[in-house]
Image (cartoon, rainbow, N blue to C red):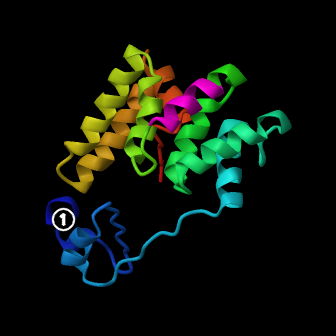
Amino acid sequence: MEFLVGGTEWFGMGSRIILTSRDKNLLISHVGDNVYEVQLLSVVEALELFSRHAFREKSPKEDFMELSREVVEHAGGLPLALKVLGSSFYRRDKKHWRHIIDRLKRIPHKDILGKLRLSFDGLDKDEKELFLDITFLEIASLSLYDLYFSKEHIMVLRDTSRGFLVDYLVEKSLLSIDLN
């Protein structure tokens, strides 16, 4: 964690550092019992979040309600899964929905990474390459300054011939850009 966060002198008074991990013991070993566990979304909240990404509306279209509920059930109330899956269904017909839902059913319920992989698998070769370029750029960063530089690098990518691919990854919820 020291590698990622660095020294306390990097931060001003009142700074808050939020660490996320799937390994609760890792967090406890570094910050003690001061660990906040994010609660899963209720079915109603999950359906709304999914709908905002799948339909760009607060609730599913009437003829997609049952299919939407199936997807929400498979996402298990996890916001990231709902966003990524919702974006992968955006502007798709029912046949495509059923195909993806059938694939979701074959993935064990707790294997959320496998479910998120469906979105990655749906990218074409250039989109996958850019996604991996950005991912490895972020992982390879050695300091907060480098992370800032990485964000700037992504913004430069948006202005190049690959820029439309960055926007596509954002639309699919596989990448988010925070300019603050």
Residue at the extreme bottom of the image, as rendered: 33
Name the image quarter holding residue 42. bottom right
Amino acid on which disc 1 is placed: Met
Magenta part, dominant SS? helix
Residue 93 seen in the current view: no
* In the image: residue 4, left or right of residue 14: left
Q: Element at badge 1?
A: loop
Residue 44 seen in the current view: yes
Categorize mark 1 by other alpha carbons within 10 Å: few (<14), some (14-19), many (20+).
Answer: few
Q: Position of residue 119 (x, y in %)?
A: 47, 31
Tag 1 residue: 1
Q: Quadrant of the N terminus?
A: bottom left
- At 33% from the left and 83% from the top, the residue drawn is 34
Range of the magenta residues? 97-106
40 to 180, vertically: above or below:
below
Q: Nearer the viewer, residue 180 or 81?
A: 81
Q: How many marks?
A: 1
Q: Position of residue 123 (x, y in %)?
A: 45, 22
Q: Nearer the viewer, residue 76 or 107?
A: 107
Report if residue 102 lies within the magenta region: yes
* In the image: residue 51, left or right of residue 154: right
- At 24% from the left and 77% from the top, the residue drawn is 28
Q: Nearer the viewer, residue 43 or 56?
A: 43
89 to 179, vertically: above or below:
above
- At 42% from the left and 29% from the top, the residue drawn is 120
Residue at the extreme right of the image, as rendered: 62
- At 25% from the left and 79% from the top, the residue drawn is 31
Report if residue 133 lies within the magenta region: no
Q: Position of residue 45 (x, y in %)?
A: 68, 59
Q: Position of residue 152 (x, y in %)?
A: 36, 39
